[in-house]
Amino acid sequence: MMREPGRASQLGNWAMHLTTSGVIAWMGLALILVSHHPKCVEDLGWLWYYTGIFGLTAGVGLSEAQRRRELGQRALLEECVRDALTDPLTGLGNRRVLHTELERAVTGPSEAYWLLLIDIDNFKDVNDTHGHQAGDQVLRTVSDTLRNCVRSSDVLTRFGGEEFAILARHSSFASVLRHAGQIRHRIAATRCRHCNVVLRVTCSIGFSRAEASLPATALVEQADQALYLAKGAGRNRCAWHDGTGTALVHATARIPDLVAQTCPSITDRPQVSIGDRIDGTARDPFESLQRVECSSTAGVS
């Protein structure tokens, strides 16, 4: 939301106007004295002296007032830009931020970028049952949970409504699958308190990989198709789009989050189950290998 110009900017404008008026008045008085008493010009050295001093002071004042005015305008412009790129409810970046980063991802260096679309399941029921303020609180709570699920290099935005988006770099399919699973489990474990009610929600996730030949809009469409499949299959699921079709995905073996955080030396080989494509053709199952270094002696079951 745009704010009114700051007090510093207003004071700067007043000072500039007052100083300008003072200079004009002083010079007008000097001209009147000279025109009516030309013989007194030689005796009015003090007038020229103080006129010069006042003019110099006025010039400094005008310069400072102009500087403050420019700073105020710059601060106002920066705030307008920030407001234009920020979702006011959650404080996350909005869709403009996402599309800017998507364009960089598909046109920049050849890195493995993945787009994850996250949709809160049955969000309409929250609004209909508990009211829109409860729905807003759910959105804020979920956005806080998502902040704890991303790295500094990831781009987290509110895509619109109850939908969020994450643009992240992952070196493998197993890595992005782990990330999506972590997000899904953490949101399911989140408790949202509104008045005397504790609300729990789940989410569905669709993701797709950015390709140099794939426009940003097409990447969003692929992730959205995968999300649609996840929700249609019962919600609280993950699905992906491989460029030709969508498929549900789930890991049959996972390392607990605590081990993943504190034990960087365990070799985990999650069995990744890939469902059939949306057109009915089958996919070959495969096993992904992920290696983590662990300094702890704690066992993993």
Image (cartoon, rainbow, N blue to C red):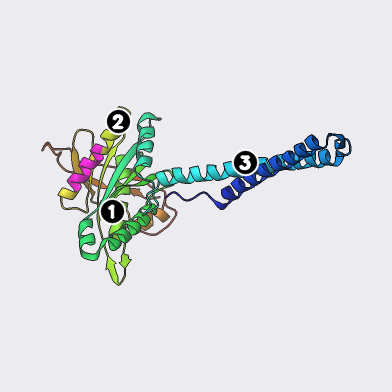
Foreground of the two, 18 or 244: 18
Which x, y percent locates residue 137?
Answer: 32, 61
Q: Quadrant of residue 41?
A: top right
Please, which residue is most extreme toward the bottom here?
196
Badge 2 is on which residue? 215
Which element is circle 2 on?
loop
Within 10 Å of disc 2 (Cα), the crowding (few <14, some 14-19, many 20+) is some
- Which residue is at the far right? 43
The residue at the point 41 percent across, 58 percent down is 297
Mark 3 against mark 2, which lies toward the viewer? Answer: 3
Image spot of residue 214 (x, y percent)? 29, 30
Residue 34 on image: x %, y %: 80, 36
Instruction: Look at the image and say whether residue 223 sits in the magenta stretch.
Output: yes
The residue beneath circle 3 is: 66
Q: Residue furthest left?
A: 280
Tell me the amino acid under the disc marked 1. Arg
Which quadrant of the rendered structure holds the C terminus? bottom left
117 relative position to 46: left or right = left
Residue 15 horizontal/vertical position (percent): 64, 47
Q: CA separation, marks 3 and 2?
A: 46 Å
Label 2 to label 1: alpha-carbon separation: 27 Å
Q: Which residues are magenta?
A: 221-230
Give the side of residue 204 with respect to residue 87, left or right.
Answer: left
Choose the circle earlier in sequence order: 2 or 1: 1
Q: Residue furthest top?
A: 213
**Which residue is labeled 1 in the image?**
184
Q: Residues within 10 Å of mark 1 (few under 14, many from 20)?
A: many
C-alpha distance separating marks 3 and 1? 53 Å
Residue 49 shown in magenta: no
Q: Earlier in the sequence, mark 3 or mark 2?
A: 3
